[in-house]
Amino acid sequence: MGVMKAITGAEAAAEAMRQINPDVVVAYPITPQTPIVEQFAKFVANGVVDTEMVPVESEHSAMSATVGAEAAGARAMSATSSQGLALMWEIVAATPGLRLPVVMSLVNRTLSAPLNIHCDHSDVMGVTTLGWIQIFSENAQEVYENLPLAVRVAEDPRIQLPAMVNQDGFITSHAVEPVEIFEDDAIRRYVGVRSMERALLDLNHVETIGAMVLPDYLLEVKRAQEEAMSHVFEVYTEAGRELTAITGHAYPFFETYKTEDAEAVIVVLNSAAGTAKVAVDAMRAKGKKVGVLKPILFRPFPYAAVREALRKVPVVGVLDRSMDFGAYAPVYSEIRNVLYDVDQRPATQSYIYGLGGRDIMSTELESVFDELLGGTVDPEHQRYVGLRE
Amino acid sequence: MSSKKSWHELEVGVVLPPATSVGYKTGGWRVFRPVWDASQCIHCMICVNYCPDMAIPIEKSEQGAVGKGGRVYKGAVRKETNFDYCKGCGICATECPSKCLTMIREEEAEQASCKL
């Protein structure tokens, strides 16, 4: 049993970082991520953690210094949002190829323009092809638990890849919720100490990292990187099982809510999944069989397992909190791919919702369910929840 | 291709042995060559410290080297530039307080050596 604390999603991330006690944290403030490093800076100032905190002049430097510390052998962490992620993109892209298990909180915020500080997923969906493990969190409790889990998965010798833990800007990061905080010792034992196996500062085994790789070897390097990513499923399961022993919570690749007999299912990431569950309960009270599938592990994407979960559902609506202009929206693309190998494919409908922090109401999601159940779907054309025509 | 490693055999994160740049000779990049006039050198080590390629070798010499004003400079003395690595950037010539380094075009240096 842990202790219940009334904290925000950002504070939950900082609590997790306090317990992880990383060697180095490098970050630059950006809304809505700022309260994570603000709270963590207090832990550093109060001597609660042993972390070397490095203030820098930009996110490009933040991720550069994080990568440098991680290469040296430290357990290094960072946190960012939106424009900050965009500015550090060059180094974010380099981290997986260097096989450095950096763990970073990403507090999802709209990518400018237009300038907007509120939540959508246009920041993370621009980096899902780079090779980071992507984990999504519905609420502050999941944020708190996903961070130590991410450290264990990222640093596993079979993986050695960076991981991003996502939470919705403001909706999760700034809203106070009861969060169960487990014992410091239990979490510290769980994450352990980072292995020095690949530490650059091991002067007895001097080596070069970050060297240029020409056409004769780059394909092989990337193939090996993909192999590591493919092992995430087994490592995530193992590390999740160990974390369950502490928390009592399960760590599936995705969560299903009342999908077993569902005639329509909504697929949606992060905080809106909570709203969708409320809508499911309201629909079920009216005798309508509907459910929700919430992806948690988004990279690598568990295609086979999601396929099994959706195989028998007649119609699937996929809600995206970002767009891919001139193409299917990011989550919808994954679900379309998932369903290709099903003989009797479910009908699908893509919805865009919640851009720039637009609220999504449970009543709007009930309307989506009604539309799905009504059978008037058009898989080729995305629809927009709450759009003024 | 068969002599090259398969993807299974690679070190995680492209880890290579240290000091691989020793095998990569960059002297061919040179447009200008630093010509060292040992008779004007004061062996102050400024060029050695400024050289971005560590291309100026030094040695410890008890008997010393004859330099500016015919004086014998003992202790650490510089040697001729290592042209396997010198890229001809000219920093040594700019920084030299004794003006004993002159940058000349590489082809002039080659023609001069042919005349000999």
Image (cartoon, rainbow, N blue to C red):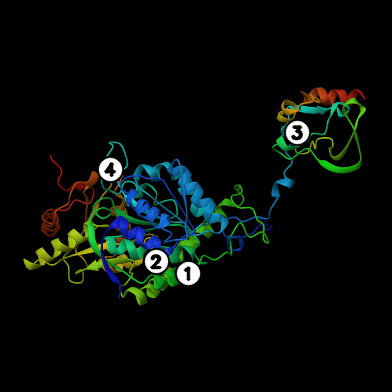
What residue sits 47% from the left and 58% below the top? A51
Depth check, mark 1 against mark 4: the one in front is 1
Report in which chain the residue with disc 4 lies.
Answer: A
Circle on res. A149:
2
Question: Which is more toward the observer, A343 or A105?
Answer: A105
Circle on res. A117:
4
Q: Residue furthest front?
A: A46
Q: Position of residue A125 (x, y in %)?
A: 34, 49
For disc 3, the marked residue is B47
What residue sits 85% from the left and 26% below the top? B40
Report in which chain the residue with disc 2 lies.
Answer: A
What residue sits 51% from the left and 58% below the top? A225
Please identify the quadrant where the N terminus of chain B is shown: bottom right
- The answer to whether marks 1 and 2 mark residues whose Cβ atoms lie closer than 8 Å is no
Name the residue type under label 3.
Cys
Question: Which is more toward the observer, A131 or B8?
Answer: A131
Q: Is residue A166 above or below residue A233?
A: above
Report in which chain the residue with disc 3 lies.
Answer: B
